[in-house]
Amino acid sequence: MAALSDFYPELQLEMAGAPVPLLDEAVRKGCIRAANHSGLVRETLASVLFSANTRSVSLVPSDAETEVAGVIFVKINNTDLSPKAPSSLILEGSERGDPKVYLFEAKLLYVYPVPTADVTATVRVELRPKRAAATIPDKILDDNDLYNAALAEAKRYLSAQVGKPWSMPPQQVKAFEDEFYRHADEAKIRAIRGDSGADLTVIQTAFGGGSNGRGPSFFNVN
């Protein structure tokens, strides 16, 4: 994992006087937005266990400073499950059998039909740093587009603050926003093409099921 301070040298060139806590906040915001927009920070969770008669499990990355932003694919017995939009059928339906579809919502992965025996899934996920992350994934620092997108968003956030020594005119704030999209869009194109680079990590997970009681929202799948 990379340190937030790895962004300081370039940030401080243009944002002189910004205090360290504010720099950290800007870096986090930049890294989260770059990861969300691109979908290029990825990990494979192997051996995700669905116990018998359990329709949902928690998805927890190997790095505690990150969280799952979306699901790319789910495989059970080497068969791809189909992504589905929220429905009462998936959340409450009574059909039992081999899972055929999945839904990801708020760190919970749902499958349907509900398995009658223990089944193990392989799940490819998109990650982002947590809002209070103390470190960021190496992928963001090592990937040129992700790094520059995160840096541009950090500069945009800081420069847009009115009345500060590091404040900048609106046209410069807009220039940082344009720079973010230039790099983040390039990273997104690579993600769509399947360029996961060196971010692949396979970990073993086994979590109990259950619902968090919240209504679902559907995440786009590349």
Image: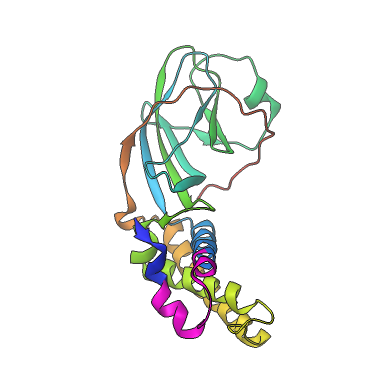
Q: Is residue 154 visible?
A: yes
Residue 20 falls inside the magenta stretch: yes
Q: 107 or 189, which lies in front?
A: 107
Residue displayed at 65% across by 19% down: 93
Q: Position of residue 142 (x, y in %)?
A: 33, 65
Q: Is residue 128 magenta?
A: no
Above or below for 125 versus 214: below
Q: Is residue 182 left or right of residue 121?
A: right
User: Residue 135: percent from the left, percent from the top?
Assistant: 41, 56
Q: Nearer the viewer, residue 153 or 2?
A: 2
**Considering only vertical position in the picture, is 12 above or below 219?**
below
Q: Nearer the viewer, residue 82 or 146?
A: 146
Tell me where residue 76 sits by quadrant.
Answer: top left
Q: Main secondary structure of the magenta part?
A: helix
Looking at the rendering, the stretch of residues picked out in magenta corresponds to 8-24
Q: Does 220 sit above or below residue 12?
A: above
Q: Nearer the viewer, residue 192 or 216?
A: 216
Quarter of the rendering containing residue 190? bottom left
**Residue 6: x %, y % from top left:** 37, 69
